[in-house]
Image: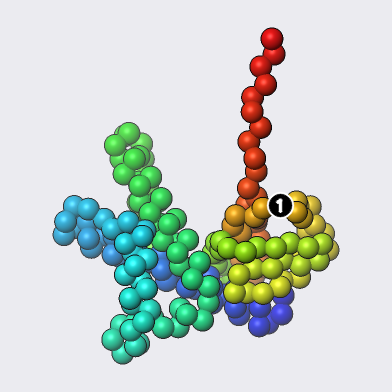
Amino acid sequence: LSNTQRLAFAKTAGCARWAWNWGLRQKIDSYKLTGKSPSAIDLHRELVVIKKLPIEEGGVPWMYEKSKCAPQEALRDLDTAYKNFFRRVKSGEKPGFPRFKAKRLGEGHFRLTGTIRVSSTHLQLPNLGRIRIAPGDRAYVANGDFTSVSVVQEHGEWFASLRVKTLEQPAVSAE
């Protein structure tokens, strides 16, 4: 990755982390007040309004610099984590409440949906452009219908994991 691409990845991961933490705070506060928490869609609608506000009024217009998918997916992941927490509480399992995400150097992650293309040498990501693939990392389905990509930074290196839409094969019965 070039330095510009590394910075773009880090900013996108920062947007996703900020959205998760903001959404978790909204869910906690709302649950304390009403006994209900807002859904991912409710939070996303509220985030769109906040993005439009100037920074002086508590807005986050800097989020427009990166893909809208990263915060959306973070809020969806948060919604799933929250539902899983309450499901585990009801079933008597160890609950594990969702935690706030800290900014850590060399660590970050985000998920993107949209138009994702893969060639033998590059990965095309929404709002991030063409990313060169390392020579040893070409074991993938090049002509798949990609639904999302998860990008993770571990120890300063970025890794992408593609989700491919597959068609289910009907079960064949042996008679």
Indicate left or right for 88 with 165 as reference: left
The amino acid type, in three-letter code, at marker 1 is Gly
Query: Which quadrant of the rendered structure holds the C terminus?
Result: top right
Q: Name which residue lies at 28% across and 86% down.
A: 57
Can the viewer see residue 71 in this picture?
A: yes
Query: Which quadrant of the rendered structure holds the N terminus?
Result: bottom right
> To which residue does mark 1 refer?
144
Local crowd size for mark 1, using a 10 Å CA cut-off: few (<14), some (14–19), many (≥20): some
Indicate left or right for 43 with 173 as reference: left
Q: Name which residue lies at 38% across and 79% down.
A: 51
Q: Toward which corner of the image does residue 47 lie, by quadrant?
A: bottom left
In the rendering, at what x and y percent does residue 88 appear?
35, 39
Task: Please determine whether, in this image, residue 75 is positioned above or below residue 56.
Answer: above
Q: Name which residue lies at 34% across and 67% down.
A: 45
Q: Name which residue lies at 41% across and 64% down.
A: 20
In the rendering, at what x and y percent does residue 152 appear?
60, 62
Query: Which color scheme is applied?
Result: rainbow
List the single residue furthest toward the left: 33
In the rendering, at what x and y percent does residue 80 appear?
41, 50
In the rendering, at what x and y percent does residue 8 appear?
60, 78
Task: Please determine whether, in this image, residue 111 is positioned above or below residue 15.
Answer: above
Indicate left or right for 63 with 134 as reference: left
In the foreground, 120 or 27:
120
Task: Please determine whether, in this image, residue 130 is positioned above or below residue 96.
Answer: below
Number of numbered discs visible in the structure rendering: 1
Indicate left or right for 27 with 51 as reference: left
Q: Secondary structure at mark 1?
A: loop
Can the viewer see residue 154 in this picture?
A: no
List the single residue furthest toward the top: 175
Q: Toward which corner of the image does residue 174 lie, by quadrant?
A: top right
Q: Toward which corner of the image does residue 32 lie, by quadrant?
A: bottom left
